[in-house]
Every structure is written in C-alpha cells, then in structure tokens.
C-alpha cells in the first residue's frame, strides 16, 4: 500500500478527493491533506509520502513550484497534478518537469483510476528494482568480506561498492549458540542461521554481516573512530536482541582493534578471531575485547580442540595401540611445557574434555557413556598431584570409552553426512570444500569423501555443483540480479567459469535460461 498526500486550497475538494475514489483497491492510502504547497512540503518533511496529488493553482506555493521542490528535496516522491481546462498548456509543461501525470477538473473517475493504476505499476517496478539493487549490493559486500578474511585481499572493493569514503571501522566475530536444545539436537540451527543473517542486513546502513561458516559470523562496522566504541556495544546488544527472536540464539563475540585504514580490516578480523579463543577462560555469551585478556595466562600446550578430534577418530577406529601412542605423545608435550606445575595442565584437560564431549556428541556418540559423568571426571583430574597421575586418569577413561564407541560408530556416519549436507545447503555461496567440512568434523577428507558417496550416491563435488546450479536457476527466474551477481551468490566468483558450468549442465547460457523461464513483460 502506497501513501498518498492530497493538496488543494479548497476543503470540500480535498475531502471529495479523499472519499470519491476507492483508493485502497488501487493500492493507495490517503495519509494526509494540505491546503497549499508549503504545507504539503512540511508534511512530506515530517511524515513522507509516496505520491502527492495537488491542484495546480494554490496560494503561497502553487502546484508546479511545489513539484519542482519535491523533485529536489524528495526525489522518490511522485506528483500528480490537478488542472482546470484553462490550465491545459500549463499542465503539459508540468509533465516536462517530471510530474508523473495530470488530471483535469472536474475529476473523472475512469481517468483517475487509469492514471493511478499506471502509477502503481511504476512504483512496483521501482520498488522491485530497489530491492534487487540492495540485495545485489549486499551479496557483493558479503562476498568481498569473506574474501578479505580468507585471503587478506579485497578491502578496496568495499569502497567501490559502498560509493563513499571510509571513515574507519572495526571487525566483530561472533560464535552463535542456542538456548533451545531441540534446535541443536535436530540441527535446525543450519536453517535458522541463514534467515537470521538476512535479518542483520537491516542492522544499519554501514554494517556488513556475513557467515564464514555455520559457527562463525563476521560483522564489519564502518564508523568514525570516535564513535566506534558506542557502535560496537550497540551492535552487539542489537544482535543479541534479534537472536532471541530466532530460536533463542545467544552470541559469544570479540572485536579486534579499530581498522583506521581500509587495508586494516583483515588485521582487525584476525585479532577478533584470536580473541574468541579466550572465551574458554573468560566465559561465553559476552563481548570480549583485548583489555579483557591482558592478565590472562596463555598456555603453551597442544590445541585441545584438534586433539579432541584426533582422539575421537582413534576411538571410532577401535585402535588401542594408536590410543596409547597418542596419549603418550600428549603427556610428552606436557612434560616439556610444564615439567613441575600441573595447574595449567589441569586447565588444558578441563577444556580438552569439554571439547571431546562436544565432538563425540556431534558425531552421534553417547558422550556420557564414553566419558562418564563429565564433572566427576574433571573433579577427579583436579585432585591429581603429578603428571603421571593425570596420565593414568586420562588413559583409563579413554580405554573404557573404546567399547562404547564401537557400539555407536556406525550410527555416527549418518550424522556426519547429515551435518555435511546441511552445511552445504546453508553455505553453498561460500568457498566451502571437502577439506573445510572434514576439518570442522575433525575427520580426514578421504574418510568423509567415502562416507558421503556411500550415503548419497554422488560425490561431494557433484552434490555441491547441483546445489549451486539449482539456486542459480532460482535466482535467474525470480530476481533481476545480474549474471555476475548470481555467480557470486552461488559460490562462483569467476563469472566466465560459472557460465561455462551452467551451459554444460543446462544446454543454455544463464541469459538464455532467464529468457526461457521468465514470463514475457
């Protein structure tokens, strides 16, 4: 429904114009009236309007002078002029001044309906073009942002797309979580996250949000350096507020140092990503800044998340020899890092077991059966006096878990493939590959490849190609996005390569396909 402002110096005429036609059936709603052009401009400034229907002869500011000012001050507002027969030539001049149309007095309903039906079609087309333009701009910005964080290059492209100087900025990285366990257990997060990301598009004009993977969102805030601190806090709170509306989402976030120059964006993102790792010590569901970590003790120990994945692989293979070897390797590294002090090692093990618990659950294992009561295990570990005691606790628990994993490892394959499919469906526009998904699952690429082909009947690359081309056909059919924008939106930054793949699979170029499937007109 488009808003309509009526301007005429005669009250009876204003009332008649508002009540004579069934405006709502034409797609308009009368939102205000004005007695002259000056009052109409004031109302436009205060409330806005999509269309102004105005008499050509009014005191203070006539219809044509008002239309000239509207063209400058409110370029998106369309004007329809009312004219008496004596003003016919005057009205023709109005058309030349970019007035949409004119209507003669006394108003004939048939002619008015014709004009406003045509006006609605024009406004609908402009609205669609505006949406497509904004969508295309957003997609390009998201693609550039992913490129920056993947390669460190592309910052200058942001300026070209935004079309404005860069006043400064900062990068925020967020890890999403869910309060609702039904969502995580049923993997609904992979359907919710893309929709949530779309909602961030309207966060502010100079905020760009994109997903780096299903567990990481990157946000670039463009703002003068003096306003960044307030912008960061406000943006984080607003994201959290919106997250609660999308399945009870919560966020652990971190910000890098301000990016004073456009080329500093990649550096700010790397800093934010690194700071997110400190949530293990500082706590989740908060915004982490560099100052929060200044007194934190950093451990020189193996990455516990990677080790959790390796141990799960060993448990899945039921390889006791490999389990012993990996355990000995870890404790050898620990003796070198902290030969006398077990306190930091206990911290490492606590985080390791939490990560192992998560990885086991993600792969479909009954983690409590494998690890026992997690809090009890950690309490037992905390009482260990020596590294040798810690090794015994660790090794005995790992051995007891082998039997349980052997019962459920076959079932876990289904969950791995389901994770992979849902990840591809939500991230097909990104530079996502077999190695990336395998790394997220903490399994080897060849193993994932075999498992995926066995479960789906097609290989990983073929599945991803089909998914991307299905989306490309949808965008060609339903949007006005350019071919290069659709290529980028479906994971093909090289338009030429995209067109070659598309023609090879469909027998038509993208442009030919669009002509074939879109209705005429």
Image (cartoon, rainbow, N blue to C red):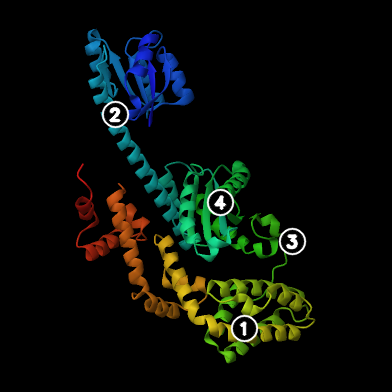
Residue 395 appears left or right of 3: right
Residue named by callout 1: 401
Q: In this view, does 243 lie above or below 107?
A: below
In depth, the one of 362 and 94 nearer the eye is 362
User: Which label was assigned to residue 295?
Assistant: 3
Viewer-nearest of labels 1 and 3? 1
Q: How far apart are marks 3 and 2 (CA)?
A: 65 Å
Evaluate whether residue 174 shows in this view.
yes
Counting other residues with Cα less than 10 Å from the Cα at mark 4, is it few (<14), some (14-19), or many (20 or more)? many
Q: How far apart are marks 1 and 3 (CA)?
A: 37 Å
In depth, the one of 442 and 260 nearer the eye is 442
Counting other residues with Cα less than 10 Å from the Cα at mark 3, is it few (<14), some (14-19), or many (20 or more)? few
Viewer-nearest of labels 3 and 4? 4
In contact (CB < 8 Å): disc 2 and disc 4: no
- For label 2, the SS is helix
Which comes before the other along the chain, label 3 or label 4?
A: 4
- For label 1, the SS is helix
In depth, the one of 341 and 381 nearer the eye is 381
Residue 229 appears left or right of 446: right
Q: How far apart are marks 2 and 4 (CA)?
A: 39 Å
Residue 304 appears left or right of 142: right
In depth, the one of 267 and 392 nearer the eye is 392
């Amino acid at each position: 429904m488009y808003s309509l402002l009526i301007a005429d110096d005669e009250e009876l005429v204003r009332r008649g114009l508002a009540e004579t036609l069934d405006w709502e059936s034409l797609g308009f709603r009368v939102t205000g009236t004005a007695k002259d052009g000056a009052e109409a401009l004031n109302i436009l400034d205060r409330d806005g309007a999509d269309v102004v229907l105005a008499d050509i002869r009014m005191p203070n500011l006539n219809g044509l002078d008002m239309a000239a000012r509207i063209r400058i001050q409110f370029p998106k507002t369309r004007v329809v002029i009312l004219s008496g027969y004596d003003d016919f030539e005057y009205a023709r001049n109005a058309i030349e001044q970019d007035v949409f149309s004119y209507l003669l007095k006394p108003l004939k309903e048939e002619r008015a309906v014709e004009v406003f039906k045509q006006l609605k079609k024009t406004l609908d087309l402009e609205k669609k073009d505006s949406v497509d333009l904004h969508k295309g701009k957003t997609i390009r910005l998201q693609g550039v942002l992913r490129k920056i964080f993947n390669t460190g290059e592309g910052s200058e492209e942001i300026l070209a797309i935004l079309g404005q100087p860069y006043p400064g900025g900062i990068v925020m990285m967020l890890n999403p979580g869910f309060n609702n366990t039904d969502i995580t257990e049923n993997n609904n997060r992979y359907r919710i996250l893309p929709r949530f990301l779309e909602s961030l598009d309207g966060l502010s004009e100079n905020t760009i949000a994109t997903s780096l993977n299903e567990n990481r969102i990157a946000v670039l805030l463009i703002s003068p350096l003096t306003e960044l601190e307030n912008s960061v806090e406000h943006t984080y709170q607003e994201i959290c507020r919106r997250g609660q509306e999308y399945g009870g989402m919560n966020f652990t976030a971190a910000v890098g140092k301000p990016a004073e120059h456009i080329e500093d964006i990649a550096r700010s993102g790397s800093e934010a990503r690194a700071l997110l790792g400190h949530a293990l010590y500082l706590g989740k569901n908060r915004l982490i800044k560099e100052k929060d970590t200044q007194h934190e003790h950093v451990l020189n120990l193996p990455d516990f998340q990677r080790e959790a994945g390796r141990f799960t692989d060993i448990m899945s293979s039921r390889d006791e020899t490999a389990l012993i070897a990996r355990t000995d390797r870890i404790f050898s590294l620990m003796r070198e890092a902290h030969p006398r002090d077990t306190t930091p090692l206990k911290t490492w093990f606590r985080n390791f077991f939490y990560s192992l618990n998560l990885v086991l659950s993600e792969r479909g294992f009954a983690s409590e059966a494998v690890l026992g009561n997690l809090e009890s295990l950690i309490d037992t570990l905390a009482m260990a006096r020596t590294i040798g005691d810690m090794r015994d606790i660790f090794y005995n628990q790992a051995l007891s878990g082998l039997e349980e994993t052997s019962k459920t490892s076959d079932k876990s394959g289904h969950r791995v493939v389901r994770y992979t499919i849902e990840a591809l469906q939500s991230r097909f526009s990104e530079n996502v590959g077999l190695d990336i998904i395998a790394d997220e699952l903490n399994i080897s690429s060849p193993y994932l490849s075999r498992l995926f082909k066995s479960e789906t009947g097609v290989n990983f690359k073929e599945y991803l190609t089909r998914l991307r081309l299905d989306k490309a056909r949808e965008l060609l059919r339903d949007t006005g996005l350019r071919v290069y924008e659709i290529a980028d939106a479906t994971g093909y930054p090289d338009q030429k390569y995209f067109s070659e793949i598309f023609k090879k699979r469909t027998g038509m170029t993208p442009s030919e396909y669009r002509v074939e499937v879109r209705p005429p007109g």
